[in-house]
Amino acid sequence: MLVFVLLKFILQYALVNSTYELHRDEFLHLDQGNHLAWGFLSVPPVTSIISKIIYFLGNTLFWIRFFPALFGALTLIFVWKAVEELKGNLFSLILAATAILFSVLLRLNILYQPNSLDVLCWTAFYFIFLKYINSADSKWLYAGALIFALGFLNKYNIIFLLVGLFPALLLTPQRSIFLKPSFYISTLLTLLLIAPNLWWQYKHHFPVYHHLKELTDTQLINVSRVGFLKEQVIYFLGSLFVLFAAFYALVFYAPFKKYRVFFWSFCITLMVFIALKAKGYYAIGLYPIYLAFGSAYLGELLKRGSTKVNNLRFACVLLPFLFFIPMYHTAFPNKTPAYILAHQATYRALGLLRWEDGKDHLLPQDFADMLGWKELANKVDLAFSRLPKGEHTLVLCDNYGQAGAINYYKKTKEVTAVSFNADYLHWINLDKKYVHLIRVKNYREVKEELKETSPFFADTFVADSVTNPYAREYGTTVFIFRNTHIDINERIKREINENEIRD
């Protein structure tokens, strides 16, 4: 197990080419560590706490990459322990670890986002439920309450675990759990643990609802159910046979009869995701525990014996690695933009160039979101140096990626970028009296920005723009507006109020 864990950490660091920077979402999550709260517009509070830990550790790339790699390694360990709980042999353990290692988790665990911890919490919860089925010990219900609360405070997506599990319980003898007082005590414990976030949501008029509505209107509208199912196949392509073995065993293998609730839970959760036109990666947390079931069953089916059986065992372990090889060349940011441009046909055929707007672009969206940020921050620093010293300059960006990247890479301490987008809407310091404005604007709205904002300032300059053609922020322009004729602070207050009403 330790060998697989070590290999997991090595691969997570090795699969990112030095050309790439952090992802736009990572900048937002890191900045949340500077504004600790019980909730945010886009995510619950756990990520911000981890960001604070990263800050104290030095806020370096190593530590930013470390935590998603750690969560991936812990997911592997829980799967290993689940196989042991199912009485799997050494072959089963190695097969499960290989299937987990060479899967979509390598891609997921590259980025510092709530998704890695989300998958870990799903896997840990299922493992704990497995322990409860085998022991009927109430302590596992309390452990499950803790894990679910952690998952909820990390990413609301884990709610869908219960959406699938509770109806599945009613379909099996495991429904007896609803008659146990410990079930309701553990449920109360969960509610107590997540109550501060629920209270925060209530005080802020449930921004999670508005965030989901915006997500549905702007992104999920471009998600097809067929595309969702295709992604499910790709995520664990090299170990599909292990998953199929799991589903077969849960239905027909007598020793697994008491675990049949897992089969129905999977089916119901997946159908709910399909019905809601969810993004494919929302369902990744479903699969790791089923790799444990499938591996344990195949270990029993392929007990050591004839040469033919031994060769088949070897092929089973080798298969996830063989399928990983083509993934290595396309699915990870380990190739330069020039390489991807030279192999456009391959990436397009796999659908990797399609962005959330439903159109094909030069690079995969996640890769384009990892370029141009240092350049932008450096040009904002340079623009700031052209203004009078002091704290009277507002750096206002179009989106959270721009603001977060500037705050992460900036060299000038006085620069603190904000935006009317995402959580930055509530992080604007109105105690300062602003006289000058550095505006970071999407290239499509350059003319409109000059027309609308210039009349309020004595001097206007177009300082520079992002020149990396592969960056999603290509063309993003930095404006300097010097010496205002109006009260900028009052204008900002009106903008904040308008954005809050719109939300």
Image (cartoon, helix red, strand yellow):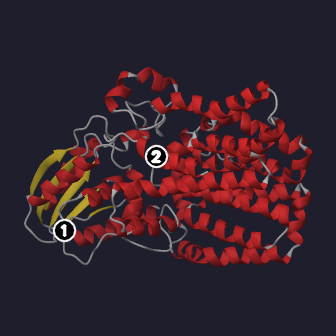
Residue 458 visible in the picture: no
Q: Is residue 274 left or right of residue 223?
A: right
Which residue is drawn at the image coordinates 38% and 28% (left, top)? 340
Q: Is residue 287 shown to the viewer in this render? A: yes
**Above or below for 96 versus 56:** above
- Nearest the viewer among 81 and 454 is 81
Which residue is at 64% across, 45% downward?
A: 97
Q: Are marks 2 and 1 in contact (CB under 8 Å)?
A: no
299 with respect to 430 (left or right) = right
**Is label 2 or label 1 in front?**
2
When the figure is inspected, residue 228 is found, relative to residue 458, above or below; the finding is above
Q: Which disc number belongs to residue 10?
A: 2
Query: Front-most of 295 and 411?
Result: 295
Q: In terms of secondary structure, where does tag 1 sit?
A: loop
- Place of residue 225 in the rendered image (x, y in percent of width and height, measured from the top left): 65, 37
Location of residue 483 in the rendering, given as x and y in whole percent from the top left corner: 10, 65
- Give how far apart the Cα atoms at labels 2 and 1 are: 37 Å
| Coordinates of residue 299 in the picture (x, y in percent) | 78, 40
Type of the residue with mark 1: Glu
Q: Is residue 29 left or right of residue 141?
A: left
Q: Residues within 10 Å of mark 1 (few under 14, many from 20)?
A: some
Identity, as a three-letter code, of the amino acid under mark 2: Ile
Residue annotated with mark 1? 414
Q: Residue at x 12, y 71 (%)?
A: 390
Q: Is residue 483 left or right of residue 182?
A: left
Looking at the rendered structure, the secondary structure element under dot 2 is: helix
| Image x and y of residue 283, in percent | 64, 47
Say which label, 2 or 1, has the lower sequence index: 2
Residue drawn 72% across and 41% down?
91
